[in-house]
Image (cartoon, rainbow, N blue to C red):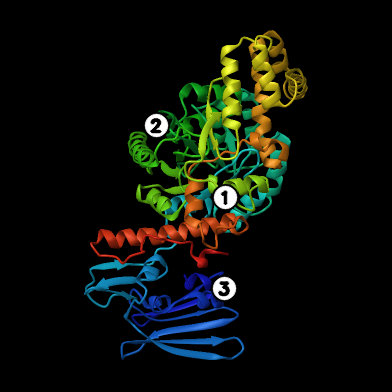
Amino acid sequence: MDLRASAATTKTWRAGGLEESLGTGSGLARALDSAGPGALVGLLADGVDAVELGDAEVSLRVEREANGLVRVRTTWAGGDVAEQFLPLEAPVGDVVEALHDGSRRLHFRDGAWYEGPASGRAECVLPPLLPEMLGNPAFRADRDLRVAYVAGAMAGGIAGTDLVLAMGEAGMLAYFGAGGLPLEAVEAALTQLAGSGRPFGFNLLHNPVEPGVESRTVDMYLAHGVRDVDASAFMGLTPSVVRYRLHGIHEVDGKVVVPNRLAAKVSRPEVAEPFMRPAPDAMLAELVAQGSLSEAQARMARHVPVAADITAEADSGGHTDRRPLSALIPLFRRLADRVSREQGYGSRVRVGAAGGIGDPWSLAAAFQLGADYVMTGSVNQCTPEAATSDTVKEMLSQAGYADVTEGPAPDMFEIGAQVQVLARGTMYAQRAARLYDLYKGCESLAAIPPAERARVEKQIFLRPIDEVWAETEAYWSARDPREVERALREPRHQMALTFRWYLGMSSRWARVGEGSRKRDYQIWCGPAMGLFNDWVKGSWLEPVEQRGVVTVARALTWGACGALRVQAARTAGIVLPEGVDSLLPARGSAP
């Protein structure tokens, strides 16, 4: 427990000098309830002689005594006083608990673990390690975050305003899942979040079928002053994503300043590299010709990367190449180092980790691999704040590690792109795959064999194909009449739009909890969901109602701190007790 961060005032005496500071903390009493002796003694680390902490409820004074003890005096606002004496170096009783608690300062000497600062030679020293210390400080500073932990965008507004606001309130970042939503719904969320005063970001999902939607989304983000965008599912640079990044670029004292922060979520080095480099000259010239950039801004753009942050997306839910994180992070880091040196950026393009993160060990591994920040996805869909149905959350809470599969992607159906989805309890992947096979094998709806047509109508659409096309035609007539005109000219395009009706509706049925279509639910999910369920099984965090998105983030990050301390002790050659690898969700991580 970080007692200093919980205090409103701090006085520190060191080598005869006094240091005073003011803070915003107002939870010292609560912190003291959770603090063990080690946290109190730990206040005297680094040559500190005495410390006084205080807020409106309580004041605490901790000071060294000449006899090798530590005097702890607690004074409550009502006048009650409590005093105790603690040994400066106390052997640890429960070693497993002490290693897992990142707030405790430990050292190992002569076959035993001691709490507090080491007074002599130690074989291993474990200073406090808190979630606020994980990852790259520059990433946190750029976005005014407490923790380098991000909740990724879940399309269709599943990562909605409640989730984004909760994460921002806790000093973490979440991206609103704008993909697949009407622009009006995205703008309503923008209006709400822009006035919140909390960190937030929005997703920009690549839309190769409707590039105009991508461009209009960027227009909206620029109009509302959105400073953080997560670009996902991009297979290359587009004018829209570059236009967002470079909007408002300027110089201050000879230094190029780019107000808009862009994080590109990618799975392949060949896709990542263009985002790490400056925008191509041809694209800059096009933006200048359009009036989106001035000539001076185009010159400045040649000195900055399109994306200052690259999120390496491994085996995740939704759009994914199912690559291993242990391969992606080292590849991307070396690529970022090389490109940053070549371009002379002065600081390396940052690399984050996403996909497969569902317990403390996997999160700790991401940071050990060198990730500057982590992004979670699947585990957040099973939280009270996620804007999806209770039925979906219950299905996800029962998922195992292997209960996922791949099915056709609704937004990239024609090119055969896949999304990773929940397999347990739903037939979406098989039914959508059957539609794609028919699309590849038939020239039109009329060319579908009668038996297959009857099967589609009875088992998948649950209504005549002609009715589905009529509804689809009405939808596209209102959204983009050019799609209907093309469908009337090209029968295969008509078939694609008709089949995409099912793919689009299947995710909507899941979000709203349409009971009659449960077997058709399209639920984006990666193996991290099963990993998380296994980790919390039998614990206080197993029930869905306990899994607040911030609670999950805190449990994972506090657990990761414990995992990193365990691994540091093991690397030092210390023989550790049984049970040290079982990092159960800590109660102290709950809000």
Q: Looking at numbered disc 1 in the image, what kind of residue is underneath it?
A: Ser
Residue 111 versus residue 168 in the image, above or below: below
Residue 437 versus residue 431 in the image, above or below: above
In terms of image quadrants, where is residue 38? bottom left
- In three-dimensional space, the C-alpha distance between marks 2 and 1, rounded to whole angstroms, equals 33 Å
The tag earlier along the polypeptide, 2 or 3, is 3
Q: Looking at numbered disc 3 in the image, what kind of residue is underneath it?
A: Gly
Q: Helix or strand or loop: what does disc 1 sit on?
A: helix
- In three-dimensional space, the C-alpha distance between marks 2 and 3, rounded to whole angstroms, equals 46 Å
Q: Helix or strand or loop: what does disc 3 sit on?
A: loop
The tag earlier along the polypeptide, 1 or 3, is 3
Tags 2 and 1 touching, CB below 8 Å:
no
Q: Which residue is mark 2?
A: 269
Q: Are there few (<14), some (14-19), or many (20+) residues within 10 Å of tag 1?
A: many
- The circle drawn on residue 295 is none
Q: Nearer the viewer, residue 415 or 216?
A: 415
Tags 1 and 3 touching, CB below 8 Å:
no
Q: Are there few (<14), some (14-19), or many (20+) residues within 10 Å of tag 3?
A: some
